Image (cartoon, rainbow, N blue to C red):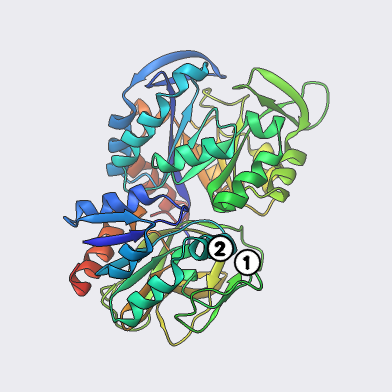
Amino acid sequence: MLRKRIIPCLDVRNGTVVKGVNFVGLREMGDPTAHARYYNDEGADELVILDITASREERRSMVHVVESVADALSIPLTVGGGIRSANDVRDMLNAGADRVSLNTAMVQRPDLIQEAADHFGSQCVVAAIDARKRADAPGWEVFIYGGHEPTGRDAVAWACEVEERGAGEILLTSMDRDGTQIGYDIPLLQALTAKVRIPVIASGGAGTLEHFAEGLLEGGASAVLAASLFHTRALTIPDLKSYLRTQGVPVR
Amino acid sequence: MITVVDYGMGNLRSVRRALQNLGRDVLITPDPAKVRDASVLILPGVGAFGEAIRRIDGLGLRAPILDHVEHGRPLLGICLGMQLLFPVSEESPGVEGLSLFPGRVMRFRGSLPVPHVGWNDATPVRSSPLFDKQGGCFYFVHSYYVETSTTTVATTTYGETFACAVQSENVFGVQFHPEKSQNDGLALLRRFCEETGA
């Protein structure tokens, strides 16, 4: 039986793991490779690294981070942040990534999704969507540039479009919930998973064991992602998997 | 020495690292002569069936791969590399695969999410050097699958029950990624190496 996946996420800036709340207020949390080795041994099912480095100059160092992290892993690695072209995708795959996640660049130039899927296969392309609940209307709006810029796009419609264009999975982050530890945005997850056929990774808001079960069982997610909750060891992956088994969730 | 065919598709770094962790020397090459002369060959791959075959043909690798097998030397196809061992795929109609096995590569239908992404069970259906009796849990990521047939040595169920591992004499294939499947994956690669003297 296909297992639900538990995915730790490393947000990396200038070679260091960082974490913020609601996409701001970053604090440093250590060496990415050390985190990767820990999660590999803890039974994580996959790892995501997102490069949140601001400038293109500094971004070059990300290749070395990916190489080092990939060499520490015997589980799959997804890499995102600043990927703007098929060549960028190739660089990350050559550095040891199995999949790449696209975000800002695919909103600005949606053809990028199909280019990446044509070259490397849909299974390689994870569409990252950062969404915030609209204040004045129903639905959720897509944001880019790490949550700094609204796009006017509806998150559910955009999810359908990225699937149509060849994405193989969606990494859905609720900006309202990110870093708050009050639970995944279940209505957002339900709205998306009802409309797309590709798997969806839930991100943003996990704070308790129950939140993970909600994301998987109620939200319809295929995988659940969290960052600081795991980094601080507030919750361990073996404990989480034991709990999920008691809730009838198939885990490895 | 294990030779990994590099036709420009896939994460070869993790295949190399896994084999090196088992103490094997690894050569990654797109060179047809080196592929032809290899003692043990691994055909990895992610991406589309048609694009992979176009690259293999473009690099002049089809004949060397087939010669290698013809001479009775071992070949292991991984993920798309397993699908390429078959003659046709629904993914790329009209493109001729390596045709080392009879059978078809089909797209997942039904209501489950596609691609099939994540960890799933490989259940042995007949004895093979690749598995012990229990099989194992492996990482999959694919939208197309190989139908079960006489060459199937293990199956996985995801809506359909499909061939997750195939073997006929010196030719092996696995749909999952052993190089990304922790202990079960390393154990499978170790068995392959020991069986083939790699």
Q: Which mark is residue B64?
A: none
Q: Which mark is residue B54?
A: 2
Residue hosting label 1: B91
- Residue B33 in view, yes or no: yes
Q: Who's the residue at 33% across and 59% down the image? A: B4
Q: Give the class, few, some or many, for how many residues have Cα within 10 Å of label 1's Cα (few <14, many ≥20).
A: some
Q: Is residue A153 above or below residue A13?
A: below
Considering the numbered disc 2 on the image, is that residue within a helix, a strand or a loop? helix
Residue at (56, 19) in percent of width and height: A23
Q: Tell me the chain of label 2.
A: B
The residue lying at 52 percent from left, 35 percent from top is A88
Q: Position of residue A50 (x, y in %)?
A: 48, 30
Disc 2 marks a residue whose amino acid type is: Arg
Secondary structure of the residue carrying tag 1 is: loop
**Chain bearing mark 1:** B
The quarter holding residue A204 reads top right
Q: Kindly report the distance in space between the C-alpha atoms of the residues bearing marks 2 and 1.
A: 14 Å
